[in-house]
Amino acid sequence: MEIVSQTPIARLTLPEGITETPSRVLVLPDLLRCLVLTWSESRAELLRSAARNESWQATVNVDVREFLHNLFLLRVPLTFVDLPEAKSMSYSVLREAAERTTELGSSLVVICGLGGNPAEEVWARQLGAWAYLPGDNGLAGLELIFGDARKAVANESLVCVELDAYR
């Protein structure tokens, strides 16, 4: 018998004969929210679509100040920073925002670059990014990373539930 519940464990009443809720069937609220920073409206729409297609509720920002404000307000399991070309005027500002993300947050961080810049990948890895995507990734590639992030967050949450870390 499979039990699926959005009720907190403390108030859960189980059917007769079942003494414990299997942790693998718990549904945790707001688990699939993510925060995205990008440099253009067209990329924002692409990232929003990829996130939505992989069951993420995305807050997408094109403005760095708004992104940093949301970084403080929202506790999300995934943060995605989409960098423009290195010669762009906004490159250093978005790169600095990515650094703030890894300093302030406890979420998985994905950094997406726009070219085969090996130094950028080394920088992203040194920040502790969960993933670095080199080059322009289309919808399918972005969906793949959002899907993998969903699985990673689910596994991390499952471990916390099994270790009784939510009580």
Image (cartoon, rainbow, N blue to C red):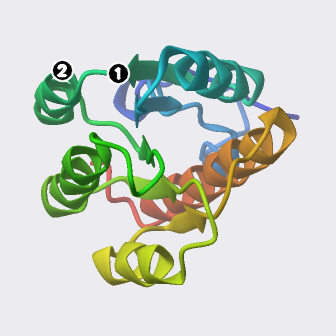
SS class of the residue under badge 2? Answer: helix
* 11 lies left or right of 45: left
Mark 2 and 1 residues: CB-CB less than 8 Å, in contact? yes
Q: Residue 139 carries which label?
A: none
Q: Where is residue 73 in the image (x, y as percent from the top left)?
A: 14, 26
| Viewer-closest of 19 and 139 | 139
Q: Where is residue 148 in the image (x, y as percent from the top left)?
A: 71, 54
Among all residues in the image, which is located at the extreme front?
87
Q: Quadrant of the N terminus?
A: top right
Q: Position of residue 152 (x, y in %)?
A: 61, 59
Q: Which mark is residue 66?
A: 2
* 102 lies left or right of 135: left
Asked if one can make out residue 32 in the rendered structure from this viewpoint, the answer is yes
Quarter of the rendering containing residue 138: top right
Quarter of the rendering containing residue 86: bottom left
Question: Which residue lies under the disc numbered 1?
Answer: 61
| Viewer-closest of 42 and 7 | 42
Crowd rating for badge 2 (residues with CA inside 10 Å; few <14, some 14–19, many 20+): few
Above or below, 157 against 56 in this view is below
